Image (cartoon, rainbow, N blue to C red):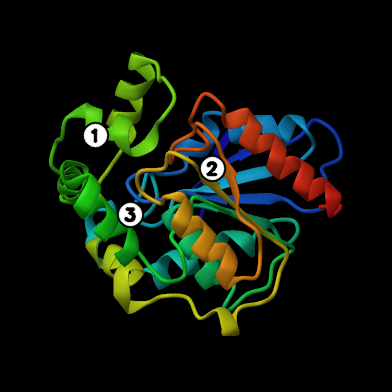
Amino acid sequence: MNAGRFGDLEVLCRTPSGQPKPAPLLFVHGAYVSAWCWEEHFLPWFAERGWAAYALSLSGHGHSRRREHLDSYSIDDYVRDVAEVAARLPAPPVLIGHSMGGMVVQKYLEQHDAPAAVLMSSVPPQGLMGSAFGLMLKRPTLLADLNRIMAGDDVDISSLREALFHQPVDAADLQRYYRLSQPESHRAIWDMTLFNLPHPGRMHQVPMLILGASHDALIPPDQVHMTATTYARRAEIFPDMGHGLMLERGWETVAARIADWLEERNL
């Protein structure tokens, strides 16, 4: 793994041993995490299959700039982070965004073109309100714990398991993921809830793969289908999986679907 910096942004990179495929992949993480979530499985897996795979930590996340100013960052700031990294890659990247990262990808496409985009358990273009109401009704304790994580408070580690996983997860891995988790920008959460939602009519029309999980507690299948309907696509829902599609035991099924889809498009 190459762990480097593009300016003040942390970027993790895995490159193939031979000639890379035409389009590099740029992975954009969700709330409460950073680039590490892609390095667990996805970056090495895609590099072994010929893609140059990059993952950035958005401003205020991981080892990227100005962690102390996290709450000042907006979704537009995160879009600028993605544009900054994309401009320094050897070719325009395919964008792969998870959860909040999927919202960032949608907003990026309002201003920039891309060879393709993959939205994994993404915040829908209608925003987080539907998800928040669902959690309020069905999992109020989880919603309260997510708010506590956002504020930087400790929570029971079982909340992380409930938020990310449906399949069994190794206790040591769960503890490590918990240590790597972090608060999220209140401003960005409000942007995704109400104040800076995507405008599909302004977006570049790119090939788009929309994926979700049948047991996702945060972005349930109905929210994923809403995203797909907005973009006139068909959602693909993975059975027996939770929100953390890149960390679940069945992660390779998800990676293989993305790889097949990219190869169908010669990317």
The outermost residue toward the bottom is 201
- Label 1 near label 3: C-beta < 8 Å? no
Mark yes or no: residue 114 visible: yes
- Label 3 near label 2: C-beta < 8 Å? no
The residue singled out by tag 1 in the image is: 159
Q: Is residue 95 left or right of residue 198?
A: right
Q: Is residue 132 left or right of residue 2?
A: left
* Disc ID at residue 4: 2
**Foreground: 114 or 247?**
247
The residue singled out by tag 3 in the image is: 60
Please state the horizontal and vertical placement of residue 19, each as a whole percent of the image.
86, 40
Please state the horizontal and vertical placement of residue 78, each as a whole percent of the image.
43, 64
Element class at badge 3: loop
Marks 2 and 3, how far apart at CA: 16 Å
Name the residue at 38% across, 20% down: 173
Q: Across the whole image, how many numbered discs are drawn on residues?
A: 3
Name the residue at 85% across, 34% down: 18
Marks 3 and 1, how far apart at CA: 23 Å
Element class at badge 1: helix
Instruction: Select label 1 or label 2 by which is in front.
Output: 1
For badge 2, the amino acid type reads: Gly
For badge 1, the amino acid type reads: Ser
Please state the horizontal and vertical placement of residue 10, each as a whole percent of the image.
47, 47
Q: Is residue 249 above or below residue 191?
A: above
Q: Mark 1 or mark 2: which comes first in sequence? A: 2
Mark 2, Cα crowd under 10 Å, few <14 / some 14-19 / many 20+, is: some
